[in-house]
Image (cartoon, rainbow, N blue to C red):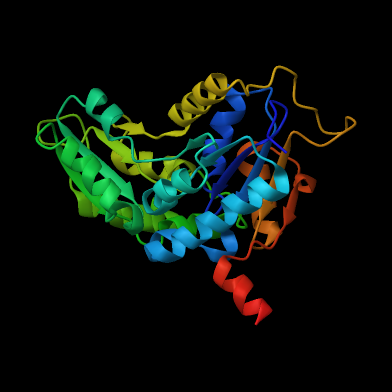
Amino acid sequence: MLPASSSPIGVFDSGVGGLSVLRALLAALPHERFVYLADSGHAPYGERGDAYVSARTHAITDYLCEQHGIKALVVACNTATAAAIHEVRSSRPALPLVGLEPAIKPALAATKTGHIGVIGTRGTLTSAKFGKLMASFAGQAHFVVQPCDGLAHAIERSVAQPVPAALGPVSATETGALCERYLHAMGEFGTGPGQMDTLVLGCTHYVFVAHELRALTGPAVQFIETGEAVARQTHRLLQTAGLLSTAPALPDGAPGRAPIRLLTTGPVEMLQAAAQRWLDLPAHWCESVNVPSAIEKWAASA
């Protein structure tokens, strides 16, 4: 059956970080239904090889298309976009598809000092796709690129912990200590000559540690993330395809399905905590699912 305007939009990430993109999508597309899938059972993507990430991306795309009849897919993960989006475009040419990449062009437009910091997972920042992106802007600014090993995974773990006291030192939490380590390694932030006045958040998870990052960079540094741009592109693609929904999404408790389904291949408690803390969504919208990749299906049938 072909997707209709009333069909949901699929959104997936290696974990709960893509909820930052879902938040932007909900604001820009209030009449749409969404199925969000956190592949937390196979995270972190940023420290896996391209072949592994590609296999997971194909498995999740197939699952969302076949089990949920999605009309479009937002790959809310920089690492999965870099490793596999070109393959997904080839395998499903009719599916409106939106990926992520670190927002280098908006950062160039924003910087006054010409010094830009970029943080992301190692998988994103060492990918051929990111290399080509950076090469296209060569000579236009001075970039300091910093892989943040372990930070996305630490953010995942942090959702089950109490919100830290606002007045405590940044380094008092695992996420804060990692932010401090990586930003200190990059150099000086600020608006003076030679200082980085712009920081690209090249992983969807990092939006959720903006407070810790702000404490380290100071108030004048601009943070650039991709959620709003992704939401605008999703709107454009759906409008072009004639698939924009014109009817309001059903509120929770109304007849029919809830406007958002939140799925995870990992512990459902983590997704519930993240959805409640970051998007104020009810825990009963979350559920655990199994999405085997091709090799796992083969092993199970052998």
Whether residue 180 is visible, yes or no, is yes
> Which of these two is toward me, 151 or 137?
137
Looking at the image, which residue sits at the far right?
Answer: 255
Q: Is residue 198 above or below residue 132?
A: above
Give the quadrant of the C terminus: bottom right
> Which of these two is toward me, 100 or 210?
100
> Which of these two is toward me, 190 or 42?
42
Image spot of residue 70 (x, y percent): 65, 39
* Residue at point 27%, 56% (across, down): 126
Image spot of residue 92 (x, y percent): 52, 44
> Which of these two is toward me, 115 or 132?
132
Give the quadrant of the N terminus: top right
Whether residue 273 is visible, yes or no, is no
Q: Is residue 160 left or right of residue 225?
A: right
Q: Quadrant of residue 151?
A: bottom left
Q: Is residue 9 above or below residue 17?
A: above
Image spot of residue 160 (x, y percent): 62, 57
- How many numbered discs, if any? 0
* Residue at point 71%, 39% (across, down): 281
Image spot of residue 238 (x, y percent): 56, 25
Q: Is residue 47 left or right of residue 183?
A: right
Looking at the image, which residue sits at the far top?
Answer: 246
* Residue at point 59%, 24% (across, down): 27
* Residue at point 57%, 42% (across, down): 19
Q: Is residue 241 above or below residue 59?
A: above
Looking at the image, which residue sits at the far bottom?
Answer: 302
